[in-house]
Image (cartoon, coloured by chain):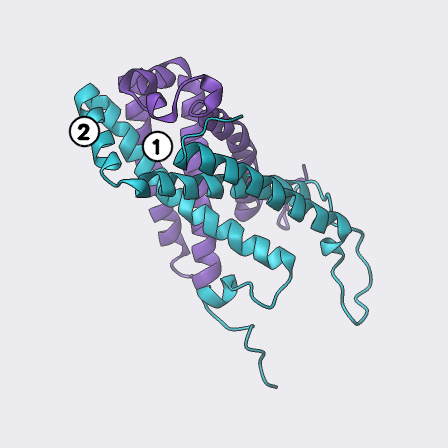
Chain colours: A purple, B cyan
Amino acid sequence: MAEPAKEKGGSLMKESWNMVVTYVTGALLVFVLTFHLLLHSPLMGVAFDSTLLFPNATGNLVDYQIVFGLLLIGAVIHGFNGIRVMVLEWLHPTRLAWLLNLIVFLLMAFFIAVGTVTLVVVG
Amino acid sequence: MKREKRFGAGLFSSLNPVGFNLERWSYTVHRATGVVMVGYLMAHIFETFQLTGGATAWANTMSALHSLGPMEMIGLWLVAGSALYHGGNGIRLILNEAFGMFMGKPILPVYPYSPTSLGRSQKVAVWTITVAVLALWVWAGLYLLAGLGVI
């Protein structure tokens, strides 16, 4: 993978690191999201509705807690960073970019917290 | 100079692919499917959180979703299609942007301009993804909407 672009003076540009994070989380999601979808597919040998029953849903979270943790973190970071980039490209908020970044960061933290509580309590 | 109508300003013009090339269509669909999935992600995290309330809370959540009738499965089918396209096209974009694959060699910009980034290999990649995604999406539709667990 290409090295992130560097500013003069050698410091790394923030947005180039964001793209690296986007690529890494995107590649991660290809695997963990595929796994998640396969748990609800005919490969499991049960009907789709049956995979949503309480014992099956909680069983998946318990058995594959790390996978679902990676899925949660990867999806939230990739998704909300994508929305942030779209808003930046749409509005070009030069003065309020920090506010957008803050809102997106808080949303990421909130949804990761809710998902983590689910994984911990169920697990 | 008169501005071409397709080069309008604003969010919707920036996303409008009509009159542009194959990559622009891919760009628009990638963004639209991304927004769909972020919306579903937020709802899905809250939905899954209901598991912490025990079997009764989960059964109530499922009942509420089932009360949507066919819209529940149609919604899941649209999300499945979004995930398939966004994932497949995302792999292509990573290979393009991070590894420089399918991009072609840079050439001097001689009129009429023809972007080397949209060469034959790029078009083959885009169409391969599109056909594969459509095939999987049809299968997902049969599985979700018709209950046919054929694989």
Question: Distance between the Cα atoms at labels 1 and 2?
Answer: 24 Å
Q: Confirm whether residue A114 shows in the render.
A: yes
Q: Tell me the crowding category of disc 1: few under 14, some 14 to 19, or many 20 or more residues within 10 angstroms, Cα based.
A: many
Residue most toward the bottom?
A: B1
Q: Amino acid at mark 1?
A: Ile
Q: Position of residue B79 (x, y in %)?
A: 42, 41
Residue B60 numbered tag: 2
Image point (66%, 41%), residue name: B98
Q: Residue at x 34, y 48 (%)?
A: A103
In this orientation, which residue lies closer to the viewer: A18 or A76? A76
Nearer to us: label 1 or label 2: 2
Image position of B32 with respect to A112: above or below: below
Residue at screen point 50% across, 61% down: B15
- According to the image, label 1 marks what residue? A112
Give the quarter of the image for residue A120.
top left
Residue B16 shows which numbered tag? Answer: none
* In the image: residue B27, left or right of residue B141: right
Relative to B63, say whether B101 is above or below: below
**Chain letter of the residue carrying label 2:** B
Is disc 1 placed on a helix, strand or loop?
helix
Q: Label 2 amino acid?
A: Asn
- Specify whether residue A17 is in view: no
